[in-house]
Image (cartoon, rainbow, N blue to C red):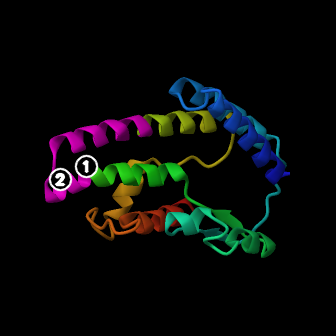
Amino acid sequence: ETNECIKELVDYLVNEINNKKGIKKRYLKKNCNIIVNKFNSVLIEKRNIVKVGVVGEIFVKYSNVGNNNLEDMLHKENCEIRVPGLMGFINHVITQKFDQVDLYGGKWYVKFISKFLYKYTCSLERIMNKQISKNSNFDLIMPFNETRELAQEVCGLGIIMGEGWLLAAEMLALCKEG
């Protein structure tokens, strides 16, 4: 049932984007409501099962080819799978730019543009969380600034190779969320 729901929503969102109705901020609230309402219709069976968080390089985290069908295997083992969202990765890429300028120097306009983009993506995150909290009992997305703070408990924001500090932050966030 969940997979059918996902397929329907992907088809719907692809159509929205193709019709230039899915990318703009004004459509986000409507689309979030549609997504939340669709998932609200899926029967959730409350069970005491092992929760598994999947973190790692973006290809490994989100691609069945990269992770050797890890999610399928975990489903067969009756695990609840938690995969951090793509928005966190996008924010990580954006914040790396102004962190690099702060830590190592660089062009002022790189910092200015990346800060502007970061404020915009954080506003999208707030819209999504508001729609989720208003219309469902699903877990909210941890605000990215909180994820950044978690990373600083164990490493510096200057660690940027691959996903750098994001890996540690996602692990800590998953632990904190239970």
Considering only vertical position in the picture, is 158 above or below 124? below
- The part of the chain drawn in magenta is 98-121
Q: Residue at x 28, y 38 (%)?
A: 113
Q: Which mark is residue 98?
A: 1
Residue plotted at (52% across, 33% down):
127
Question: Which picture quadrant has residue 72?
Answer: bottom right
In the rendered image, residue 45, in percent from the top left (x then y), is placed at 83, 57
* Amino acid found under the numbered disc labelled 1: Phe
Residue 174, relative to residue 69: is it above or below? above
Cβ atoms under marks 1 and 2 closer than 8 Å: yes
Residue 130: name its quadrant.
Answer: top right
| Relative horizontal placement of residue 38, taking residue 99 as reference (left or right) | right
Q: Kindly indicate the quadrant of the structure image that contains residue 167.
A: bottom left
Q: Report the residue at 80% width, 52% height from top.
A: 2
Q: Nearer the viewer, residue 89 or 175?
A: 89
Q: Residue 8: percent from the left, percent from the top? A: 79, 42
